[in-house]
Image: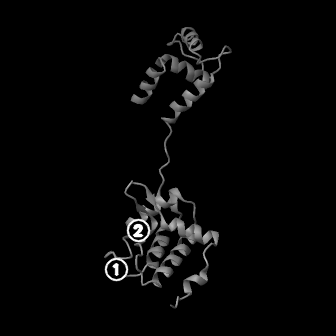
Amino acid sequence: MNEIFNRLIKESLTPNSLYVLYCIQNKISVQKLVNSSLEIKRLQVDAWLKEDLTLSGKSIIFMEELNSYFRKSKKKTSKNLMGEHFDVCIKTYNETFPTKKLGSGKYARTNIKNLETGFRWFFENYDYTWETVLNATKKYVLEYSLKNYEYMRTSQYFIRKQNSDKSFESDLATYCDILLDGSSNEEDIFKEKIV
């Protein structure tokens, strides 16, 4: 409510003026509690209303802005973001990683709740299917298994890792892109270099 009154003050509008704008916008007759002729003259002088008593461009934008304060934002649940059986997919994802400690001293598999938080972020920022996510993860784990899991990220950090500047990066998104682009040559994974 405070924001609305601050906006009215900034725009030099009275609550009565706002009420008149609202009535005109919604084609409602103005109640006798407000001196509509006085308010309409003031709104026309300040370019809130056109000569034909319709809302000006700045009025339409202003009213839309005020209406946005009253819209209920739909809460994004895990089910909405990740699909019906997201919990099964997260478990399958986590089980793709080995059950061992990595060179970093952390276990490759991470707690499911931490993964759910990471995947909520992932699906808000990227538009991949679970099938792509799981196939990209298999590719990643296979590549690092051939290197004895050296420098491999945990299942949580593979989804997203926070940088020092507070931004996030996602190796999972990179692997999803590689998988979808087909730019990776599968034969390279199985080649062994002999010196």
Look at the image and tell me whether residue 138 can be seen: yes
Three-letter amino acid code at disc 2? Gln
Q: Alpha-carbon neighbours of circle 1 within 10 Å: few (<14), some, or many (≥20)?
A: few
Whole-percent x, y for residue 119 in the image: 46, 63
Q: Residue at coordinates 41% horizontally, 72% vertically from top-left? A: 153
Name the residue furthest bottom: 194
Disc on the earlier residue, 2 or 1: 1
Residue denoted by label 1: 101
Q: Is residue 87 above or below residue 7?
A: below
Q: Is residue 68 left or right of residue 182?
A: left
The foreground one among 22 and 154 is 154
Q: Is residue 191 left or right of residue 50?
A: left
For residue 50, which quarter of the picture? top right
Residue denoted by label 2: 156
For residue 118, which quarter of the picture? bottom left
Three-letter amino acid code at disc 1? Lys
